[in-house]
Image (cartoon, rainbow, N blue to C red):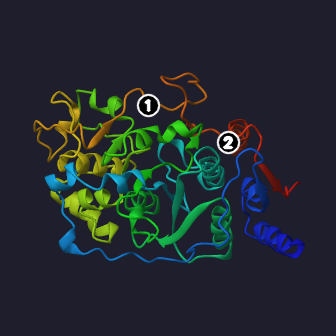
């Protein structure tokens, strides 16, 4: 172990890895006296770029009325909730002052918080990369797996790395461990879970096909065409994601289909995942919005009178806490960070949210 640690630190120094990454990446042990965290004994699929082939005949942009209103309730109630994350390993977006935000560094803390507060849920992260998989990337993936996540590496494949990391979250159901009736919830890698109420809508309304916890904030806006459902914590059955996105195993093809059909004029790709998800949700008829909502101003959407009470969860007052907001309706469920917050800010919040009960045995590289 000492030789491995020495090798890794030397490697980190040679590659000029940021100090905060070196601080935590050599986690030797993780334990939580009050709430044990499941640490998988085997690293899962670190080199996999495998996609499951989906039968084209079974995929439809529209979901049949029979599927929307029926289904095996028992299977739904026993389904697994998956927190689906995506990370571009090699770069950050430079929009909204996020160029120096420590996404890669704080991901392990986010995964640990999911395991600590919501042990009944599982976490999957798809890491998008450009170039080749390096030894540093492999070690990073193994660390995330030890923290409790299912990990896959996938090449950017000609698509913008950050954009693919955002979109890959929607189709995590490709992974063989995720069943069709499992609930795939799209989350950011820097979403810090505060308590298990973060999954309350999925737990309390298992009969639904789509859950939009931050529904109210979007549908009540009447003006403009830029409003979209907040991607954080949108949940769907794995099969529902595939069907409403008309996803057939290739993200590039799926995206180009939407761009062509809707004649999108994109000056930025940062909200592409939200635009795509919002359009697909409303077009499917599984969820709807009030006739007065500005969402219907999106190109390609036409309002229809639909009763979605059996298929769609409409969240109200479902908001994050952050450094400016400490009290929200029905209490804090997750914590949001601003672009200027450092790794130390995240680490201090992590210790607070776990009551300092998760002990990280870290070898700190000092000057």
Label 1 with label 2: CB-CB less than 8 Å:
no
**Is residue 269 something one can see in this rendering?**
no
Q: Does residue 139 lie above or below 92 as drawn?
A: below
User: Quarter of the image containing the N terminus?
Assistant: bottom right
User: Quarter of the image containing the C terminus?
Assistant: bottom right
* Label 1: element kind: loop
Residue annotated with mark 2: 346
Q: Tell me how far mark 1 sits from mark 2, CA to CA.
A: 22 Å
Residue at 18 percent of width and 73 percent of height: 57
Residue closest to the far front = 74
Q: Does residue 227 lie above or below 54 as drawn?
A: above
> Where is residue 190 shown, x and y percent of the image?
57, 46
Residue at 32 percent of width and 68 percent of height: 252
> Where is residue 321 shown, x and y percent of the image?
55, 30
Say left or right for 142 vs 72.
Answer: right
How crowded pointer 1 is (Cα within 10 Å; few <14, some 14-19, many 20+) is rated as many
Say left or right for 175 vs 354.
Answer: left
How crowded pointer 2 is (Cα within 10 Å; few <14, some 14-19, many 20+) is rated as many
- Answer with the quarter of the image where residue 217 lies: top left
> Where is residue 330 shown, x and y percent of the image?
49, 24
Number of numbered discs: 2
Mark before the other along the chain sequence, 1 or 2: 1
Residue annotated with mark 1: 318
- Answer with the quarter of the image where residue 178 lies: bottom left
> Where is residue 191 shown, x and y percent of the image?
55, 44
């Amino acid at each position: 172990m000492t030789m491995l640690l020495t090798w890794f630190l030397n490697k980190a120094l040679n590659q000029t890895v940021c100090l905060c990454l070196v601080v935590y990446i050599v986690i030797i042990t993780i334990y939580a006296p009050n709430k044990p965290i499941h640490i998988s004994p085997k690293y899962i699929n670190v080199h996999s770029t495998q996609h499951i082939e989906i039968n084209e005949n079974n995929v439809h942009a529209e979901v049949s009325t029979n599927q929307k209103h029926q289904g095996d309730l028992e299977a739904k109630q026993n389904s697994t909730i998956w927190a689906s994350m995506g990370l571009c390993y090699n770069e950050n977006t430079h929009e909204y002052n996020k160029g120096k935000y420590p996404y890669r560094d704080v991901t392990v803390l986010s995964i640990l918080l999911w395991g600590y507060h919501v042990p009944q849920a599982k976490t999957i992260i798809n890491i998008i990369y450009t170039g080749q998989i390096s030894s540093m990337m492999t070690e990073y993936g193994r660390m995330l797996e030890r923290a409790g996540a299912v990990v896959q590496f996938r090449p950017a494949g000609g698509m913008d790395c950050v954009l693919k990391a955002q979109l890959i979250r929607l189709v995590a159901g490709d992974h063989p461990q995720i069943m069709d009736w499992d609930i795939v919830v799209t989350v950011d890698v820097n979403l810090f879970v505060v308590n298990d109420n973060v999954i309350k809508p999925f737990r309390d309304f298992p009969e639904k096909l789509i859950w939009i916890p931050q529904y109210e904030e979007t549908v009540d806006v009447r003006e403009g065409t830029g409003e979209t459902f907040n991607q954080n914590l949108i949940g769907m059955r794995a099969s529902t994601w595939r069907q409403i996105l008309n996803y057939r195993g290739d993200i590039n093809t799926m995206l180009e289909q939407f761009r062509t059909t809707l004649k999108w004029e994109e000056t930025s790709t940062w909200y592409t995942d939200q635009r795509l998800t919002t359009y697909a949700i409303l077009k499917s008829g599984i969820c709807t919005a009030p006739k007065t909502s500005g969402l219907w101003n999106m190109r390609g959407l036409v309002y229809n009178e639909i009763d979605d009470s059996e298929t769609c969860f409409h969240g109200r007052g479902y908001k994050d806490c952050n450094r400016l907001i400490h009290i929200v309706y029905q209490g804090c469920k997750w914590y949001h960070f601003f672009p200027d917050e450092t790794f130390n800010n995240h680490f201090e919040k992590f210790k607070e949210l776990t009551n300092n009960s998760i002990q990280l045995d870290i070898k700190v590289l000092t000057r």
